[in-house]
Image (tube, coloured by chain):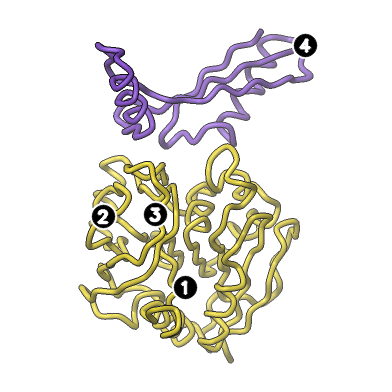
Amino acid sequence: MSLKAGVVVFPGSNCDRDLAVALRRAGADVTMIWHKETELPAGLDLVGVPGGFSFGDYLRCGAIAARAPIMRAVVDFVHAGGYGLGVCNGFQVLIETGLLPGALMRNAGLRFVCAPVGLEVATTDSAFTRAYARGERLEIPIAHHDGNYFADPETLAALADQDRIALRYTENPNGSAADIAGILSENRRVLGLMPHPERAVDPAHGGADGARMFAGLVAALSGEAVRA
Amino acid sequence: MKARVHVTLKTGVLDPQGEAVRHSLGALGFEGVGEVRIGKVIELEVAETDRAAAEARVREMCEKLLANTVIENYAVEIA
């Protein structure tokens, strides 16, 4: 059985279809889920929260989306052992729900940065990163104004001690603490990251380093009874 | 009742926007400007008629949505 994924769509999401395409290419069945829904489709293994500018980034990036009806169902799904992937604005949304720790602030250089960046795979101990080698260098694009990861020193120490930093920037583009580009939840089943792996899954994208994230996920989750 | 919420960055959280404004003030010739911190003011009308009840309600809104307490502090004023 292949992986069953849902991709949440908010007003202002703009990477939802890219994420669906990347997941489908890796072999997943994908359903799009409108933010006003209050329940997820039955039998999902993974919920993807896509990039974009949900609700116009009003108040704080991701703040309004995190309180949308569907997100209550997503939080319950994750608490029941479901997998979650938040890309860019999706990472901001997951942080605003409290599923991942810290905050994403305005880039230190104050500029919107849209460019391919170098990343280092900091852990392979997750369904998202298991297809890479530890320390492997990747090139994946970023496109954000608010990706400057902040957390208090205790949280940063816990993330490092528990091997929950998934990806680090090789050259920090936004001021993120500890060069953090992506982090895992405590149960390692939720990944939030600012870079866009779904924009690097085909050589025509200029690079395909993101493809293995989706391939690894599908391999890891297919046929597995994911939810408790 | 009317309420006003001030949302400010916590001490120790860097404020790159404030830093940029400080530089710009310097470029305009305003000397002696120390740290600049940028926050938000949110004005709300609430149905409560009791001050204490209104304040409690707005504080709950701050905790749940208006402020991100990881990086922000808030103060509530009831007009």
In the image, are marks 4 and 1 on the same chain? no
Q: Which chain is purple?
A: B
* Chain A as rendered: colour: yellow
Residue at 64 percent across and 64 percent down: it is A8
Instruction: Find numbered disc 3 in the image and state the secondary structure of the residue it sits on.
Output: strand
Q: Report which residue position mark 3 lands on.
A: A113
Q: Report which residue position mark 4 lands on.
A: B49
Mark 3–mark 1 distance (CA, rounded to whole Å): 15 Å
**Label 1: chain letter:** A
**Label 4: chain letter:** B
Using the rendered view, name the quadrant where residue A211 is placed.
Answer: bottom left
Q: Report which residue position mark 1 lands on.
A: A199
User: Between disc 1 and disc 2, whose residue precedes?
Assistant: 2
User: Between disc 3 and disc 1, whose residue precedes?
Assistant: 3
Neighbour tally class for label 1: few under 14, some 14-19, many 20 plus, Cα within 10 Å: many
Picture disc at residue A172: 2
Q: Are marks 4 and 1 in contact (CB under 8 Å)?
A: no
Residue A118 coordinates in the image, percent (x, y) = 27, 67
Q: Tell me the kind of residue under disc 3.
A: Val
Instruction: Find numbered disc 1 in the image and state the secondary structure of the residue it sits on.
Output: helix
Q: Tell me the kind of residue under disc 2.
A: Asn
Instruction: Please say if A166 is above or below A96.
Output: below
Mark 4–mark 1 distance (CA, rounded to whole Å): 52 Å
Tell which tag, 3 or 4, sits nearer the viewer: 3
**Label 3: chain letter:** A
Residue A217 coordinates in the image, percent (x, y) = 45, 80
